[in-house]
Amino acid sequence: MPDPGDGESADRRAELASRLQAVRARVDAACAAAGRDPSAVQLLPVTKFFPASDVLALVESGAVEFGESREPEAGRKADEVRAVSGRSDLRFHMIGQLQRNKAKTVARWADRVHSVDSPKLAHALDRAVGTARESGDRDGALEVLIQIGLDDDEAKGRGGVVEDELLTLANGIEQSANLRLCGLMVITPLHGSAEAWMAKAAGIAQRFIAEHPGAAELSAGMSGDLEIAVKYGSTCVRVGTAIMGDRPVISP
Ligand SMILES: *Cc1c(COP(=O)(O)O)cnc(C)c1O
């Protein structure tokens, strides 16, 4: 008996495949315009709010790394996608704001966290990863990025540490047993000029890399501003809407 959902899911798979390809073409064009090597910019599909079947469709289209931002949705989905696909090479990134009490669950499924924004969160993740490694729930260290805040007026900003606190946090992470510092992450504030914010982020990143040459990654750019982010040195664009379509509206 044919599954009545088959036609619909085939359509969705085709839609995701073509949107993924179109966004990759945008990233490649932005790299060409900036004189950068396209292999130096990762396209990370952001699958929050969308079902495991969509993630599996993207796997079929060649994607191997995914961004998620909400627990427990993220952990459940990562488990399901790994089990159904039977693949051990898929990687899941936690990109959203993270509370310390979620460190334990995130340590179980995440390969990378983009949103470390305090020494307390770094410490909680370090301990949680240590426990997960001891109990055999996890293999390696957790890769982390420090989220930098661009707007000093935090009320209007979108989280992250200010530059003054950056080196202290970075040194703490580098001394931890279970975290590996890979670079910085930024979310461009919604107000003002995206280009001016990205130029500011690039300046912070340049000064940071001088101190931490082994942590040279910069996660920046989303559906709306990925071209600007690539121009200013992003090594990872996190793209949801342009690949997945509109997310459901969350009620407050
Ligand atoms: C949801 C999300 C994205 C993707 O945003 P789009 O505008 O849908 O591409 C990127 N980064 C973070 C931190 C997110 O939470």
Image (cartoon, rainbow, N blue to C red):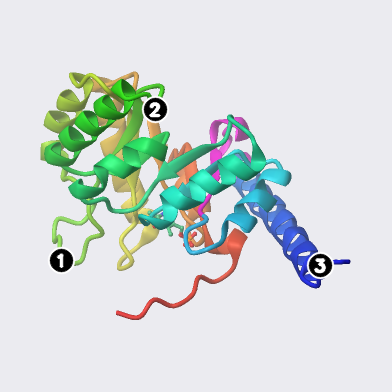
Find out whether the residues at labels 3 and 2 contact each other: C-beta distance under 8 Å.
Answer: no
Q: Nearer the viewer, residue 50 or 105?
A: 105
What residue is drawn where x is 30% and y is 68%?
191
Spatial CA span between label 3 and label 2: 37 Å
Instruction: Report helix, strand or loop for mark 3.
Output: loop
Instruction: Report helix, strand or loop for mark 2.
Output: loop
- The residue under label 3 is 3
Please tell me whether residue 210 belongs to the stretch shown in magenta. Answer: no
The image quarter in which residue 121 lies: top left
Question: What amino acid does circle 3 point to?
Answer: Asp
Please tell me whether residue 44 belongs to the stretch shown in magenta. Answer: yes
- The residue under label 2 is 138
Residue 155 is labelled as 1
The N terminus is located in which quarter? Answer: bottom right
Spatial CA span between label 1 and label 2: 37 Å
- With respect to residue 53, does 132 lie above or below? above
What residue is drawn where x is 27% and y is 21%?
212
The image quarter in which residue 165 lies: top left
For marks 3 and 2 on the same chain, the one whose residue lies earlier in the sequence: 3
Which residue appears farthest toward the bottom when viewing the image? 251
Which residue appears farthest toward the front when viewing the image? 1
Find out whether the residues at labels 1 and 3 contact each other: C-beta distance under 8 Å.
Answer: no
Q: The magenta stretch spans which residues? A: 32-46
Instruction: Report helix, strand or loop for mark 1.
Output: loop
